[in-house]
Image (cartoon, rainbow, N blue to C red):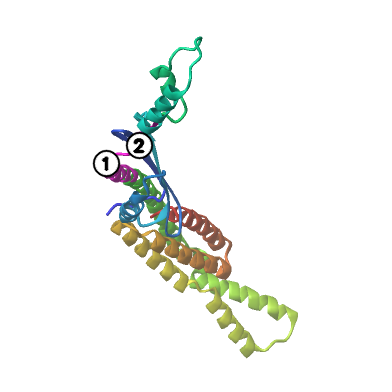
Amino acid sequence: MAISSMTGFAQGVGFCAPFHWRWELKTVNSKGLDLRLRLPPGFDALDIPARGAISKALSRGACHANLSVTRESPTVTAKINRELLAHLMETLASLPRPANIGPPTLDGLLGLRGVVETGEAEEDEAALAAAQKIILAGLDAALVQLQAMRRAEGAALAAFLTQRIDRIEALTKAADACPGRQPEAVKEKLRQAVAQICELGRFDETRLHQEAVLLAGRADIREELDRLYSHVGAARKLLGEGGGVGRRLDFLAQEFGRESNTLCAKSNDAALTSLGLELKVEVEQLREQAQNIE
């Protein structure tokens, strides 16, 4: 499986009479899957299936999914209140009418409040159901687009992480071969230290020997080097597996950090310390980018 990033954007638009709809999907980094779905009024029925589709497509990241729907100009209906109209006509017919006032006209009566009732046509349930089905299909298409974008960015991240891992391995090998940690170099440093102590006066030779052995043991970075080699192999394996390996890569980056910190702390050689600092820089870059992996 391919490596995917947690950041991406996609959208989908469509029309199903009488609705124009648009999906907008945006994902960013998150420890888990944090879904925030916004639906317009009247489309609440899409909540559960939409969440299910997104959860199936994405395993990690904060996803902002927004659906906007606009309706074509609604059909206006007019209804005549026949009872009220008949009552008005009957009432007007029974009233005496001055000579200078003409008989009531139909358009005049229809213009009276309440005689004609207007409103929008009731929503066609079949049209709404058909639109919801198409809108969900549009969400699936947008999710495919989003996944493609996340995989494209994931490929770039995988290449970058591979470079960092290669560099970490190279620095580990350089530290392993560093002249300052060779037995002869360690022995010479101890000899110089002993010579300086001898110049100060009397000392306990047995105690000095014990301290020298202890010092040499503390300066040994063999375990740290072995663990760094092991972590390099594990990181390459995870990148080869692909899929949702972001959490494991993040954890492995923390382990890299611990070993590089210990290596620097144990170092008693300037060249080895310099290698350890370079190693810490590479590990930090690895950690930062690993947090972008799904």
Residue 119, located in which quarter of the rendered image?
top left
Secondary structure mostly seen in magenta is helix
Against 192, residue 122 (above or below) is above
Q: Which mark is residue 134?
A: 1
Identity of the residue drawn at 74% across and 83% down: 201
Q: Are marks 2 and 1 in contact (CB under 8 Å)?
A: yes
Is 193 magenta? The answer is no
Q: Which residues are magenta?
A: 118-146
Picture residue at 48% right of the left edge, 19% below the top:
96
- The local secondary structure at tag 1 comes to helix
- Asked whether residue 167 appears in the rendered view, the answer is no
**Residue lying at the far right of the rendered structure:** 200
Q: Is residue 283 left or right of residue 10?
A: right
Q: Residue at x 32, y 55 (%)?
A: 52
N-terminal-most mark, 2 or 1: 2
Q: Tell me the quadrant of the picture where the C terminus can be found.
A: bottom left
User: Mark 2 and mark 1: span between their CA atoms?
Assistant: 10 Å
Q: Is residue 220 left or right of residue 243?
A: right
Q: Which mark is residue 260?
A: none
